[in-house]
């Protein structure tokens, strides 16, 4: 179980694309590891639940779960138990992704569960206000992703730089230990450079890399301007 | 990917107990396989998502997912994609478990997805009426489990035999190809025998085996009266 | 509390359009009553929760709730209690509308609650399969509305007549007492005539009337071919 | 539409008790108005959606909705549109009650909708952490209610005073304009006095008054120590 220890970081969310499922997920994780090794960049991958064990056993970069349910061990058929993904090799989790929003009280529960389990928490948010709210819960990272830009190819760092800057400002006032990532529309080295220039300490992205003709080349380009 | 081909069957739902997570899940799956081999009984296991790959690669009995989300491949972070659990080795899925109820339209979607994927579908229901409704969607199995008896240790086959019989009757009128399982409170050979006597073709159970002092002994007892 | 006693019927779903909220909802309900009186057609209206009391006290046509929650009286802040909307004057309810889908077990609960309360139940469905499932729960009506046609202006009775006919067939096999309505894209007299010709006993519609320049004229046209 | 203009305040949540539904809801609202008039205390009532219009037209104290859905006007059958409850006479709303928790992004949407509509927002929370998160969204009030004490008869102001004090502290650091209410187990004058002594500016309560043998006497007692 490899931890994220440095920033800037790139978190590659595998979502539920067929291009990042099963055998292809493993291949993409290995590519991510290669790029991490070749460039020294901190790269983490967030595969589907059923791929966590398989990937965590094969690569030496951090593996995150895409979601954790706010349940304790017991009778919760179909839920994602944090102990289960941790034992499978996950060292952290995305929480409240825009495609898997959860209740405020449940974000609190899951961030605390992650802390207790020694796992990294990345709470996703949609604007400056909810980013501030998320920061009060003291996750390791808040990842701001304006939903209208997700998968759009229009980078948030260019389209709405004030959202990234505003998020960095408000979060640092609330808790300077909470790091900010930005996502939505990020795919190139320019996008990532712009994100870091706005105060983010990394990016969360998916389709820009996963659906690229050559994911390795796309990842190399992403980290090329740092 | 081992298919369920015969009845009677035992489906062991691992839920999210720590006793059936990770390494312990694998051990329980191997015990299930041993009992299947020793007795000739058809036994399937339904582990958590993150354990599917690990278990399916190690045992030669059917592995079911505990839940499938009604989504297509794409941008659905945190969801359980049927293609993912299938590639991980699942040959079927529990659907609409009482701890993971889903919308009617979504049961329809997931049953169809399972059929298209060549996977077995087990739709869980809570009474005669919803069992009839589930049967019209043509899953392979309907598993009737009165929620008040789940985890109670009071077997549905004794406490509410009319619910099991009524379910068998109504389902066979709607579609004789849909098989009936029963669950809730089942743990002993007597319970299973009674269930089959009422027309069920198997049982769905969890805590009675998983939390037993000696799960293998409990499983052997469960199938001893058939 | 006026009951629906005859078919064919028209159920006008007020949804949450501003054109059918508050004072405008009352006006639209009065127009519906006028058309019912002038033409002898059975017309019911389904306003928002907060408008039920106000409308039911002013018109002598059936008023339906748009949704009922599957809860008993007690601590359920924010839920729609059937006793509440009944006392406010509702004589029935839409259940499982495509914009408010609920779990299978909850449809069963709410249909039974409606029956016990002497209220009419209209379960909405999206295709032939879920219509069959809904019929097994014995509501008064099943309203089949292919979601892709809702609000489209393309009438289901023309675009997908086989869905309406298939629904009528399968429901009458399961329970001849369950009446079929059809919805989605219905707005003209031709659409309604076609729907009845396919075996439906009425229509469920919204935007075609609510957003019309002249709702009374639109309603009069809707019922003109019967 | 009467606004809450002063504190301390008492908000009486009618929940879905039969004792506070329909005719009985109206009676309880009138009792609340009498006590407000007799004592000068600011009292607001939060009836079920279908009772808002009826009550708001008969009493001259603030009426709150129990819930608002995060939807705009349009096709949202069964949802609670803010414009609808406002026109029915509500001057504010409970948001995220423990019996009706919503997603973080939706709390943000509804608080903003309330502000734009000139309505008072009361966001309910379960602990110090989520209270801080709620405060960053700038509602008028945050009402802290430890779920385990709701309906228990054990007042939060005595059982967990540190939760109330901690909430007051953290919220005043984040935004001194956000007022704190406390709830859960409150029923007597002593409970309310203790709550105000801890820095709360009012109480949110339900069963302690609604289910009392003599609700008027219970309300008079509640406000007797201020």
Image (cartoon, coloured by chain):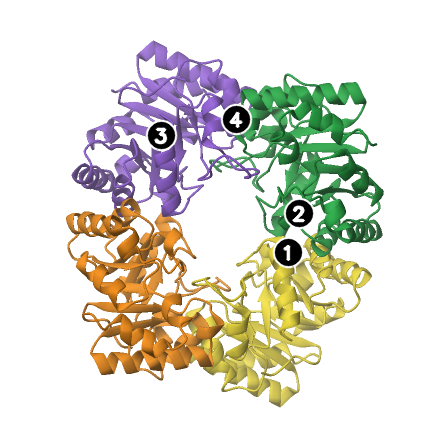
Chain colours: A purple, B green, C yellow, D orange
Q: Judging from the image, what secondary structure is the residue with disc 1 in? A: loop
Disc 3 marks which residue? A116
Residue at left 63%, top 23%? B28
In the image, residue A77 above or below residue D11: above
Using the rendered image of the protein, determine whether residue A1 is visible from the camera's viewpoint.
yes
Q: Report which quarter residue A122 is drawn in.
A: top left
Disc 4 marks which residue? A19
Disc 1 marks which residue? C126
Residue at left 39%, top 51%? D148
Q: Within 10 angstroms of label 4, few (less than 14), some, or many (20 or more) residues? A: some
Residue at left 43%, top 23%? A90
Q: Position of residue B173 (x, y in %)?
A: 84, 53
Q: Are marks 4 and 1 on the same chain?
A: no
Q: Which chain hosts label 4?
A: A
Q: Judging from the image, what secondary structure is the residue with disc 4 in? A: helix
The disc placed on residue D220 is none
**Distance of label 4 from label 2 (alpha carbons):** 26 Å
Q: Which chain hosts label 3?
A: A
Q: Position of residue B89 (x, y in %)?
A: 64, 24
- Whether the residues at callouts 2 and 1 have beta carbons within 8 Å, the answer is yes
Q: Which chain hosts label 2?
A: B
């Amino acid at each position: 179980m490899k931890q994220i220890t440095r920033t800037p970081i790139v978190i590659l969310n595998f979502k539920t694309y067929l291009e990042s499922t099963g055998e292809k997920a493993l291949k993409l994780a290995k590519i991510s590891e290669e790029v991490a090794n070749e460039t020294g960049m901190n790269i983490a991958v967030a595969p589907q639940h059923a791929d966590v064990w398989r990937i965590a056993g094969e690569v030496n970069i951090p593996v995150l779960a895409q979601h954790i349910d706010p349940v304790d061990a017991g009778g919760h058929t179909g839920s994602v138990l944090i102990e289960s993904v941790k034992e499978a090799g996950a060292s952290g989790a995305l929480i409240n992704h825009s495609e898997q929003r959860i209740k405020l009280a449940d974000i609190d529960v899951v961030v605390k569960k992650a802390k207790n389990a020694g796992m990294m928490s990345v709470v996703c948010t949609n604007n400056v206000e909810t980013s501030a709210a998320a920061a009060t819960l003291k996750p390791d990272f808040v990842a701001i992703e304006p939903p209208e830009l997700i998968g759009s190819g229009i980078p948030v760092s260019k389209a709405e730089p004030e959202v990234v800057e505003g998020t960095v400002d408000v979060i640092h006032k609330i808790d300077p230990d909470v790091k900010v990532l930005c996502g939505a529309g990020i795919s190139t080295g320019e996008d990532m450079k712009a994100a870091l220039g706005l105060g983010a300490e990394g990016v969360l992205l998916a389709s820009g890399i996963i659906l690229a003709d050559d994911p390795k080349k796309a990842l190399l380009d992403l980290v090329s301007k740092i």
